[in-house]
Amino acid sequence: MFKFPPQGPRRLRIVGLGALALLVASAAVAPASSANPAASTAEKATVDVAAPPGVDEIASSSNLRQIANIPKPGPFNTTAALNSDLAFQDRYVFAGNYDGFVIYDVKNPARPSIVSQVLCPGSQNDITVYGDLLFLSTDSPRSDDSCSSTGVPSSQTVWEGIKIFDIKNKKAPRYIKSVETACGSHTHTLVPGKDRKSVYLYVSSYGPSSTYAGCPTPHDSISIIKVPVKKPTDAAVVAVPDLFAADGGGNPGGNGSSTTSGCHDITVFASKDLAAGACMGDGILLDIRDREAPRVINRVRDTTNFAFWHSATFNNAGTKVVFTDELGGGSGATCVESVEPTRGANAVYDITGRGDGRKLVFKSYFKIPRLNTSLENCVAHNGSLIPVLGRDIMVQAWYQGGISVWDFTDSARPVELGYWERGPLSETERIIGGSWSAYWYNGHIYSNDIQKGLDVLEVRDWRLWSAQLTKYKEFNPQTQPTYWGGL
């Protein structure tokens, strides 16, 4: 997501093998013809919308429908208070907002309710959870590390970094610790420690400047915070690895893509000791066997079509990575006829080779096949895999381009399976809005809409039947779980 100028133990439960066999048999005998409603839905799912929906109108394929919405609660109900990322635990959804976070109870997904709300300004408030702990990113210069801090000019930076909350009591979260990090924390990724006694945060930040007091140049690094689970108040930065030193620095920019000065987002596949980093002008693959010393084993650039490497998602087997390009910084109208379908899109890469010889090999681009108006910010943004047996399918947010479900099992020929979107927020001006994050969690899609609040979508599609068998106890989308044993 764009940066505003400064103001001055995942656990997976699978149903029994008997139920699995029954569902496999049911899917096998389902006729793939137009007489089958599910098959008919599949055929219609990728039809383009001839005309974008009007202001606040909803358009969708027949296999996705909204079942709930909770508007942003006050004081988050202003245009400037942008909703951001999501995390999940048991029956709860944790939703970041530039002014704090909200905890929702989604035991009944069709009737979510607000459990608590914490006012704690500090964009973007990227969010993760682990047991009784909640972690929140602050990436704007603040007067101090409290939740009553005020914004200050970057030349006077006092504090940016990670805030830690105790969420044992979901109705009354407690702020217990802060950890300052270089250049703040635009996003962070939760990485389970191998001894289960600690959890790590890989903190991504960027935008250094000779006049930025908390973020001088150069900045080709990430910060690694170690959090002792039983004593989180001892959390501290334990390493600040330079990810690009071995290759003479990151992308210098001026070549059709961004200058690399840090990373925007990192996704870890902890069970495979792998991570993928989206680092502004570079996409990287990392070995994270040593959690405190990640190593870059391959780096790729795309100076033709990628403007800003934003985020990454592995497939089920850890043999592919989907990188997103946030062309226009999240505020641009890039889903219009004048912008090529290879711009502001996803790029699918296969991972070839073994060990340190692994390489990222480009296979294709994917962009939603519908046009938006010039009044809608639209570009590839946050999404997650849908745990479908034997397929690589993900759900993804596209800001005001809505929510897309697409299949990249064939790396060279990705295809959309369904979509859901709202029309623009205004008839006369472009207001930043739309789905910031769209994730699959325990049978439903949850979307944090920047302006409209929490949306819950139901999916009815026979191709996704096996996803209903996966139940999480905890889910942080950038901490990627293994589905189906990595099939």
Image (cartoon, grey):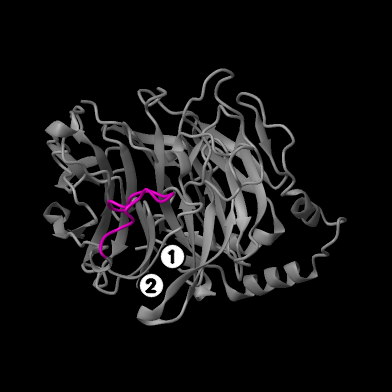
Check if mark 2's residue and mark 1's residue have beta carbons within 8 Å: yes
Q: Main secondary structure of the magenta part?
A: loop
User: Horizontal and vertical percent for residue 28?
Assistant: 76, 71
Give, as a three-letter code, the residue at label 1. Answer: Pro
Q: Say which of 216 and 110 sits in front.
A: 216
For residue 378, side relative to residue 54 (left or right): left
Quadrant of the rendering where the C terminus is positioned: bottom right
Q: Quadrant of residue 299?
A: bottom left
Q: Is residue 26 left or right of residue 287?
A: right
Residue of label 1: 481
Check disc 2: other Cα within 10 Å, few if <14, some if 14-19, many if 20+. Answer: some
Instruction: State whether residue 437 is above or below residue 377.
Output: below
Q: Is residue 61 left or right of residue 209?
A: right
Which residue is pictured at 15% across the width and 56% down the height?
A: 237
Q: Where, by quadrant of the figure, is residue 85 drawn?
A: top left
Would residue 268 be seen by someone viewing this image from the given angle? no
Could you say where residue 155 lies in the image, as x and y percent from the top left? 14, 33
Which residue, as the protein is rendered here, is positioned at the far front? 255
Q: Which residue has dot 2 on it?
A: 271
Please tell me whether mark 1 sits on a helix, a strand or a loop: loop
Residue 226, numbered circle = none
Secondary element at image label 2: helix
Residues drawn in magenta: 248-263
Query: Is 414 included in the stretch rendered in magenta?
Result: no
The tag earlier along the polypeptide, 2 or 1, is: 2
Question: Residue 437 or 298: which is nearer the viewer?
Answer: 298
Residue 206 in view of the camera: yes
Residue 350 position, x and y percent, is 51, 70
> Which residue type does callout 2 highlight?
Ser
Residue at the top extreme, as displayed: 428
